[in-house]
Image: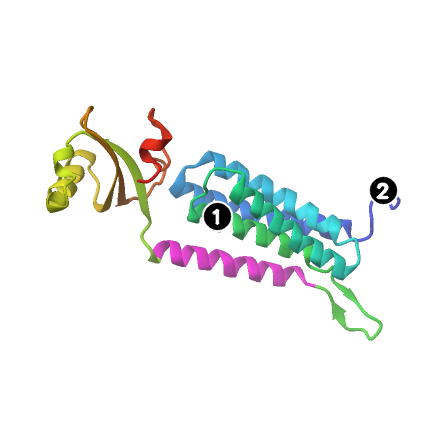
Amino acid sequence: MQDLFSNGFADILLRFAICILVNWGIVHFLYFKKSQRRDFYFTFIIISVAIFFLVYLMMGMDRGKATMGVGLGLFGIFSIMRYRTDSMPVREMTYLFVVVCLSVVHAMADMVGVDANGKIVGTPIAELVVIDIIVILAIIIFEKMLKMETTKLVQYDRIELIKPEKRDELIADLEQRLGIKVFDVKVGAVDFLRDMAMLRVSYEGESAGEVDQKIKIKNSEYANV
């Protein structure tokens, strides 16, 4: 068995178990309960697993080369996600950054050992747990302190209310018909032939499940909303 696995592989598996458990808890209990976005749930967990083992294998190289490689690799990943995929909301990007950072921290932590002078070297598991707790507490505190403002795209039929002088009437009508507390309304494309306007409505909500909803209209009609 010693020929199959490198020294300290058991320690790596323990750190991976802690890492994936912490990231799963953050994604499931702090992110998913509010967003209900199953696509990002899958993305966060799989990226966490992939980043952990990618960094772990790269750490087998020279320390300086590995650090540079990890930095360039993460830069490449975020660049691809930024320019080659659909726009990711800020909240989702923040959670992605958190799970990636925790995966890197757990993978790059040195195995605990004793040097020639009898001093303990490496990163104890307890330190990683403390780091995880600090990150989780920071997320919980700011999620509780800051009310989440979400947006909804609305195909609106009463275009006579989109005039600036009738903004209060527009907001009141939206609140009555949608049953939500509206904070802001932005008017996009207006179709006078169909008496329809595209609105981006910002409101306070516990769930962001309705954000980025798909509706059967052309992208050009709401691209600038």
Q: Main secondary structure of the magenta part?
A: helix
Q: Specify which label sits upstream in the sequence, 2 or 1.
A: 2
Residue 36, given in percent of the width and then of the height, sits at 41, 37
Query: Do labels 2 and 1 touch, CB within 8 Å?
Result: no
Q: CA distance from mark 2 to mark 1?
A: 38 Å
**Magenta region, residue range:** 123-144
Which class describes the residues within 10 Å of circle 2: few (<14), some (14-19), or many (20+)?
Answer: few
Residue 203, given in percent of the width and then of the height, sits at 26, 45
Q: Nearer the viewer, mark 2 or mark 1?
A: 1
Location of mark 1 (residue): 93
Q: Which mark is residue 4?
A: 2
Left or right: where 223 falls relative to 8: left
When asked about the image quadrant of residue 81, the answer is: top right
Residue 220, given in percent of the width and then of the height, sits at 35, 32
- Give the quadrant of the N terminus: top right
Left or right: where 38 falls relative to 131: left
Disc 2 residue type (three-letter):
Leu
Q: Residue at x 52, y 59 (%)?
A: 133
Which class describes the residues within 10 Å of circle 1: few (<14), some (14-19), or many (20+)?
Answer: some
Left or right: where 121 falls relative to 38: right
Tell me: residue 193, above or below residue 11.
above
Can residue 170 be seen here? The reply is yes
